[in-house]
Structures are given as C-alpha cells and as structure tokens.
C-alpha cells in the first residue's frame, strides 16, 4: 500500500529540506511547493494526504489559499506554519479551514505526532463515510463448511490476500461474493482503511459516473455543490464493484485509467486527481463472452482478471448445507429473540435435497420465512416454503477445471439428486455400481444420507 504523501509549502528551500528530510525518515512521501500557485496545481493533480503550509508566501498568504484548497479537497488536513503568530491570526486560520496553526520554529517530533493524529482522524472519517454508502453485508464466514469446493476457495483467497492486484470474484447470484469481498478487505494490508462498495447493475451511466468519480460544482443542472466520489472516499482502501459486467461501456475506460494510472477526473472538472485503491470486482456473468460480444472492454477484463476467484454454487456444497442452515437459524433466532430453534429431521432432508438455484441467499430467505410464519421451536418440512417458480440459474462456466474435477462434481450432483442412492445414481450415470463406488472412494465424495 502507498505511503501517505505530505505536501510541504514554503518559499525558503532550507526549511522545506529540513521538514522533508525528517518526514521521509519517518516513513512519509513528501512533495514540495514554494508558492500559492504551485500548491493549487499540486492539489489539482496529486491530492496529497496532508499539507504543511507557510503562512506568508511570495504570491499570497495562507488565508487566501485555505478556502480554495478546502473547496477542492475538503478532507485533506492542513497545518499552517508562521513566524508571526497571534491568537487573532490563529482563530482566523481555523475559521478558514486550517486544522492546526503552529508558530515557527516548529518542533519536528511534535509535528510528526500532530500529522499522525490528523491522518488517523481523516482515515476514520473516510471509513464512516464508506460505511454509510455501502450496502449491508452479513458477517457470515465466507468459508463456512467442510466441502472440498469451499476449502479450495479458502485456500485460493488466502493466497491472494497480500497482493495489491485486482481480484475478480465469479459466481452465481446469491453465493456470497460480497461477503467474500469484505473478508478479503478485512484481512488485507488495507484493513484499517475504508471499504466502499457499489452495485453496477441497473445504474444509468450518469449516476454511476457521479457516484464513482464525483462531480465539480456546476457540472450539470442541479450540481450546486461539488461531490466527492466513492473512489476518493476509498483512498488508501478498497473499492468493491459488484456486477461489474453490467457497467456501461462509457464508464469502463475511465475505470481502466484509474487502475492503470491511479488517476481520475471528477465529472465536469478539468484536472486529474490521484487515488490509491485496490479493486475487487464481482460478476455472475461470463465476462469472456461479453468481451467477444463487445459489451465489455478486453483491456479492462484482463486488468481486473489478474487474480480470479470462483465461489461455488450451493448445489456443489452438499455437505455444507446443514452447517449453513444451522448457523443461519441461530442468527435468525438471536435477531428475533427466539432461542432454541431447531430443524426436524424431515426439514433437514428437504434442505439437503433442494437444488438451491438462489444459493445461500435463497437458503436464508427460506429459513427466515419459516421462522416468521411458525410459532414452533422445532421447524419441520411443512414449515419450509420453497419458491417453486425460481428457476435454476446456469452455472458460471469454468474452463480452468480439469476433466477429473468435472467428473467429480458431476458425480456429486447426481448423488444429491438421487438422495444418496448409489444404485439409482449409477443407473443415471450409465456405469456399473461397483465403478461408482470406486469413484466415490477415489474422489473422496461424501454420499448424502438417504
């Protein structure tokens, strides 16, 4: 993750050098400016994390500069230094937007402590803003279960945690792609920074652009103030774009610029801004096919598909269904103040044999509906109301699977459909029963109890 960048503004090169040397030795990156104009140009293009500004400069003073800087980057902490300190001047500077006002000569260790505190407050504000903007995520362990498919996902996810490259999470609707994205952020080096998410499905190009990139004052009718986009809110942290396959083609090249150059431009603005984010994207669609159909840019696809993760559908996690069901039921019981809720054996069998086209989201809905509509402590099969109109969604094509793994998954599906009856499954597979037993042993498949 990039280090915090501090802008040092002073028209005396010796003072700039002293502060720069100290801050760089403390782990910061430092940029320099010697005038108001140079400061404005840097804010328009680089957006430092904080700025230390001398009060009196050759082409103006800090009181004239502060409102313009706050208008461009309202969250950036500004520290004013002056050799002519007075209480009145300090009060006026604070009113104009300064976060701190210090008199020269400044104690550099004290300045470092002050910067650490200001940057921590900035980080907390960004996290609060992000938490308000993102959709609610459940705190389900994304790897809850014992199936080979979920263990493989857990292994793959832990492998990519330390990387800064983009991650593309593929999987059917309702499999928990958003839960996995939040887990990846929470266990990454960016965990202390903001996590911002946005679902691209169904959003107009105009709304999506202003949400992501923000807009300048007067950019369009009704833009009476400037707006900070989610990319700026997530600076230093993670952006999760759900259903990226639905992103309008007009927005795709702008997102690509952010990923390649770490820069973007607000709607209606003329200056680029620098941003440091990690992108997590998710889709239930076949992006490769969308690229072939020219609905998705190939360069953006290859950029976000650096580290692909595939979330398995619930029908391929037969041994996990009861584990997930019991966990979700406990949470629902706690939320509704109904402790001790349990599933009867016939309810468990019904849950295990249902195809779950809506995956974990459908499982939670079925259980929540049963809890709300039944006053029994033990839920039976008759309490479970499945949505018969919900058609199974086609699985995400995975051309990376070996023939061995494809065969293993197919045998598991047939065994689940036949409720664990090996003889019936063998007939359906058109192989001898002894051969099926050998493959069950070979692939270490857990046979559902009939």
Image: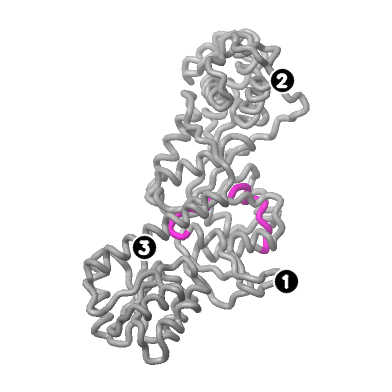
Q: CA distance from mark 3 to mark 1?
A: 35 Å
Which element type, helix, strand or loop, lies under badge 1?
Answer: loop
> Residue 234 vs residue 159: left or right?
right
Please tell me which of labels 3 and 1 falls first in the chain. 3
Q: Position of residue 303 (x, y in %)?
A: 52, 57
Q: Residue at x 62, y 38 (%)?
A: 397
Q: Residue at x 32, y 87 (%)?
A: 11
Please tell me which of labels 3 and 2 falls first in the chain. 3
Q: Which residues are magenta?
A: 235-250
> Residue 59 vs residue 318: left or right?
left
Residue 221 numbered tag:
1
Which residue is nearer to you in this view: 106 or 317? 106
Q: Position of residue 121 (x, y in %)?
A: 39, 58
Residue position for label 3: 118
Q: Residue at x 38, y 48 (%)?
A: 162
Q: CA distance from mark 2 to mark 1?
A: 49 Å
Q: CA distance from mark 3 to mark 2?
A: 53 Å
> Residue 27 vs residue 281: left or right?
left
Pointer 3: residues within 10 angstroms few (<14), some, or many (20+)?
Answer: many
Quarter of the image where one finds residue 333 = top right
Which residue is nearer to you in this view: 272 or 217? 217
Q: Is residue 432 visible?
A: no
């Amino acid at each position: 993750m990039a280090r915090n960048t501090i802008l040092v503004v002073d028209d005396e090169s010796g003072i700039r050098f002293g502060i720069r040397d100290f801050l760089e030795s403390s782990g910061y990156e430092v940029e320099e400016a010697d005038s108001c104009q140079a400061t404005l140009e840097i804010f328009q293009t680089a957006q430092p994390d904080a700025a230390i500004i001398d009060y009196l400069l050759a082409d103006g003073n800090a009181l004239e500069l502060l409102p313009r800087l706050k208008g461009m980057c309202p969250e950036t902490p500004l520290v004013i230094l002056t050799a002519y300190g007075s209480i009145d001047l300090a009060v006026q500077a604070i009113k104009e937007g300064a976060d701190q006002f210090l008199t020269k000569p400044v104690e550099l260790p004290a300045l470092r402590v002050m910067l650490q505190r200001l940057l921590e407050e900035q980080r907390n504000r960004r996290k609060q803003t992000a938490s308000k903007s993102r959709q609610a995520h459940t705190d389900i362990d994304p790897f809850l279960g014992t199936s080979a498919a979920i263990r493989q996902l857990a292994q793959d996810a832990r492998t990519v945690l330390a990387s800064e490259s983009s991650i593309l999470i593929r999987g059917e609707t309702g499999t928990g792609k958003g839960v996995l994205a939040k887990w990846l952020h929470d266990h990454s080096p960016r965990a202390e920074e903001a996590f911002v998410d946005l679902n691209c499905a169904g959003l107009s190009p105009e709304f999506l652009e202003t949400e992501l990139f923000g807009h300048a004052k007067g950019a369009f009718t009704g833009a009476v103030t400037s707006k900070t986009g989610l990319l700026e809110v997530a600076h230093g942290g993670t952006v999760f774009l759900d259903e990226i396959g639905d992103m309008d083609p007009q927005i795709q090249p702008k997102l690509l610029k952010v990923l390649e150059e770490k820069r973007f431009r607000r709607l209606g603005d003329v200056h680029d801004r620098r941003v440091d984010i990690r992108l997590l994207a998710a889709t239930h669609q076949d992006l490769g096919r969308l690229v072939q159909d020219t609905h998705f840019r190939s360069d953006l696809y290859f950029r976000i598909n650096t580290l692909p993760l595939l979330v398995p559908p619930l029908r391929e996690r037969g041994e996990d269904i009861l584990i997930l069901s019991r966990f979700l039921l406990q949470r629902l019981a706690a939320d509704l103040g109904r402790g001790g809720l349990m599933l009867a054996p016939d309810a468990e069998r019904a849950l295990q044999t249902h195809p779950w086209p809506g995956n974990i989201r459908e499982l939670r809905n079925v259980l929540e509906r049963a809890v709300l509509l039944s006053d029994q402590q033990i839920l039976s099969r008759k309490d479970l109301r499945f949505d018969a109109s919900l058609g199974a969604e086609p699985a995400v094509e995975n051309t990376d699977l070996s023939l061995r793994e494809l065969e293993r998954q197919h045998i598991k599906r047939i065994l689940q459909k036949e409720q664990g009856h090996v003889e019936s499954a063998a007939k359906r597979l058109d192989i001898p029963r002894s051969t099926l037993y050998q493959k069950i042993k070979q692939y270490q498949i857990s046979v559902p109890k009939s």
